[in-house]
Image (cartoon, grey):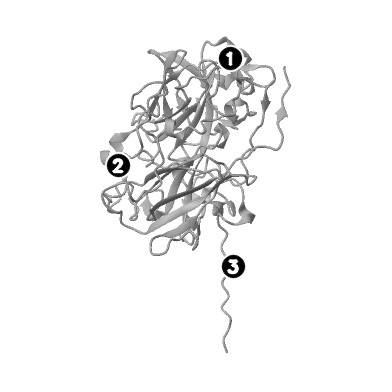
Amino acid sequence: MSLILPYAREDAGQPPSLHAPYASTVARSPRQPLVTIPHTLTETTGPAGCWETLMGGSLADLTTQHKGAPQGQRIIVSGRVLDERGRPVPNTVMEIWQANAAGRYIHKKDQWDAPLDPNFTGAGRVVTDDQGRYQYVTVRPGAYPWGNHHNAWRPSHIHLSLLGPAFATRIITQMYFPDDPLIEIDPIANAVPLPFRQRMVSRFDIETTRPNWALGYLFDVVLRGRDATPTEDDHDD
Amino acid sequence: MTTEQVNPAPRLDNQDPDLFGQTPSQTVGPFFHYGLPWKGGADLVGQSDMGARPELFPEDHYVLNLAPPKGPVSGEVITLEGVVYDADGKPVPDAMIEIWQANAAGRYASPDDARPDVPLDDGFIGFGRAATGEDGLYRFKTVLPGAVPGLGNGLQAPHIAVSVFGRGIIKRLTTRIYFEGQDANASDPILALVPAERRETLLARRQDGAWRFDIVLQGAAETVFFDI
């Protein structure tokens, strides 16, 4: 007999796999129905509390990884990782990657004609404290054009990757900035229906802003949570 | 005569209590290679650099650490590989595959698997990450997992949980790798939920000394993906 405490299923704010305005989804999304499965130990476990052993130490300041300071607006991004019942998710890893202030990725396949910055890679990693809090320092990424449709531009965004406590809680998302007019016309952000799309928009925060140093933004990440009570599955057929 | 200046209502954003709920998924995009797949991420048992694509960015921009050394593991070491295909049968060169599995004894290295009677391997976590190459190929080195508890009193056949990310994949796709020839497959409670004619898309097969598991995102041989 195994007691399994399942996680909640995805809520109404998750995007569909096929969102034709984001053209690459058309050939890369399944057409067969997904097979719904119950949560077993496979889905309710995950690597946890072993980040240093698994991938290495924290990289919380993206502005000090090279000889000089990167170009652009220095920002502090701070927030919490919570489950959907509002409980903190402590000691969990969040991986971060982004374009530089001009909107250019260090990646060789990014051939947009905006300058690279030798002092900026754009990769980081933080681990939440016992109250689920995290903070990192970076520069605000620029917007950039892409080939999805005529005159397509991605809004400024920071890519975030979280594992959470279980295979079921894994999420990769993007954090956007407030008052960015490009969000409205971005097929990737718009794969998420309103109002849920706004869950991906950070908030400027004067308290997080450090005088004479950097602007502050708040962004909480909410992972799938566990149901209230364990279900004892004794269907033994 | 002055009129009081009134700020417009704040726009809904991440901090609004009315909007509280799961953070939506977004694509990993095409440019994740300097940020996610670290050197050694696809080698769960050895010291190799497998998993990363360091040729896709300048060397001095590799800031992800080398994974620390792993310890000895029990069980059969295996190579697990396959190609990710799109709807047109073209390899996907910008996908990222993650695996999560139990050790050879069937124990997950997770606080949520607290069974004291099933041994852990000190040097084995069971989580791996690999970027696909230009040929769409991913490759892991790991151990053949043991059987793990299923529903009720039953066991699940040895399997590996898989996450698929990539450009054009807005939301993680999840599937499972089972191993051809395992007697336990016939009584596995999750395989039993899959239409019989599609079950073989979940079976890795022996090929050239490795276990081969292709992932077909769409089309006639489409891999079974799960709603978990």
Identify the residue under disc 2.
B61
Image point (61%, 53%), residue name: B19
Image point (38%, 48%), residue name: A61
- Sequence order check: which comes first, mark 3 or mark 2? 3
Dots 3 and 1 on the same chain: yes
> Does residue B222 sit above or below B146 in this rendering?
below
Q: Position of residue B182 (x, y in %)?
A: 54, 11
In the image shown, does A13 or B8 lie closer to the viewer? B8
| Contact flag, marks 3 and 1 (Cβ < 8 Å) | no
- Sequence order check: which comes first, mark 3 or mark 1? 3
Identify the residue under disc 1.
B185
Q: CA distance from mark 3 to mark 1?
A: 58 Å
Kindly state the secondary structure of the residue where label 3 is placed. Answer: loop
Whether residue B224 appears in this view of the structure is yes
For the C terminus of chain B, the image quarter is top right
Whether residue B170 appears in this view of the structure is no
Kindly state the secondary structure of the residue where label 2 is placed. Answer: helix
Identify the residue under disc 3.
B9
Q: CA distance from mark 3 to mark 2?
A: 43 Å
Q: Hey, what amino acid is under mark 3? A: Ala
Q: Position of residue A82 (x, y in %)?
A: 58, 45
For the N terminus of chain B, the image quarter is bottom right
Crowdedness near tag 1: few (<14), some (14–19) or many (≥20) residues, C-alpha within 10 Å: some
Q: Nearest to the eye among marks 3 and 1: give it.
A: 3
Chain name for mark 3: B
Which of the 4 image quarters holds residue A5? top right
Chain name for mark 2: B
